[in-house]
Amino acid sequence: MKSAPLSRRSFVRYSTAVVAMAGSAAAVFAQADAKPKSIRLGGPAFAKADDPEVYALAHRKLGYRAAYAPSIPLSDAARIRAFTEAFTKHDVVLAEVGRWVNLMDADAAKRQQNLQTVTDGLALAEALGALCCVDIAGSFNSTSWFGPHPDNFTPKFFDAAVENARKIIDAVKPKRAKFCYEVMGWAYPDTPDNYLKLIKAIDRPGFGVHLDPCNAVNSPEKFYRNTDLLNECFDKLGPWIASCHAKDLTWDVEMNVHFREVRPGKGSVDYTTYLRRVAALPHSPPLMLEHLPNAEEYAAAAKYVVETGTKAGLSFE
């Protein structure tokens, strides 16, 4: 479908937010110097989620002040309340409900099922007080739910992403949680400018940004100039960022371009800039470690992030 035009009020709100975040990174840092700069770091706790109290404390023992939301049936109101109370008590933010399904699936029945899965995920995030529910916008790839496809950069894909986001948000009508698409390198939203176009087209206060800058690195230029990419992401998308992922990228040299995910500190991402920009946001979105194979790797990643942030004058709540 074609995107509906913005109302004057929505356009003014959108434009004002962009202008507020525009300008150089130096200006943002200078403004942030007036207050303490801190980050909520999070990741998996490798603990059973049977007891909400124990589960929340397991994150604190690892030095985390943010967590991935547990999977709880929407019908289990008592358990949702228990988790909300435990995480609030121990000051651990529930960062995100992940619902990793293909909203563009070629099979109509599967596509509708996936839409309901994400809608229920946003409803769970709202009930838990989690900051967001996140999925990718999807893919027209018929063999991989997240894979590349030439039509992932077409008006058809863009309009479907807009329609899906509106349906999900309008069904839940969240007051606290945001629905977000994660940045991807081979489908919208792939760049800060294309993310802004989606924000404008969706035109819902319940829509936010999930930032994974590594996913936006899809060329040698972006790999080598990832500092510029990071600053562009925060300059343009800062007000809408609900949660961030923390990983790193290295380039495996062969006869074509091959970037590979590695743990933070083992790649080329400018983590000093990344951490400074996260810390400078007034609404303190969490930074969530992901895609690591075991607890030891997560501990090493957390150690690197904390040491890098501390050297940059940041603290971790």
Image (spheres, grey):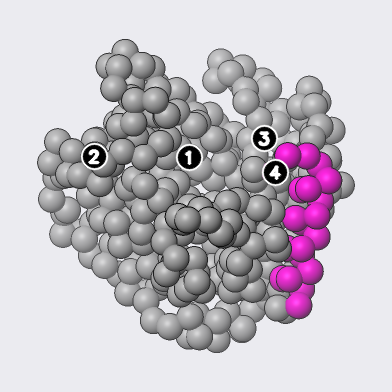
Residue bearing the label numbered 1: 134
Amino acid type of the residue that numbered disc 4 sits on in the rendered structure:
Leu
- Residue 50 spot, x, y in % from top left: 78, 22
Residue drawn at the location 67% of the way across and 35% of the way down: 84
Residue span colored magenta: 292-311
Please identify the quadrant where the N terminus is shown: top left
Q: Earlier in the sequence, mark 1 or mark 2?
A: 1
Residue bearing the label numbered 4: 292
Residue bearing the label numbered 2: 151
Q: Earlier in the sequence, mark 1 or mark 3?
A: 3
Taking 88 as reference, is 117 left or right?
left
Q: Nearer the viewer, mark 4 or mark 3?
A: 4
Residue drawn at the location 36% of the way across and 59% of the way down: 191
Residue bearing the label numbered 3: 84
C-alpha distance separating marks 1 and 2: 22 Å
Q: Main secondary structure of the magenta part?
A: helix
Amino acid type of the residue that numbered disc 2 sits on in the rendered structure:
Asp
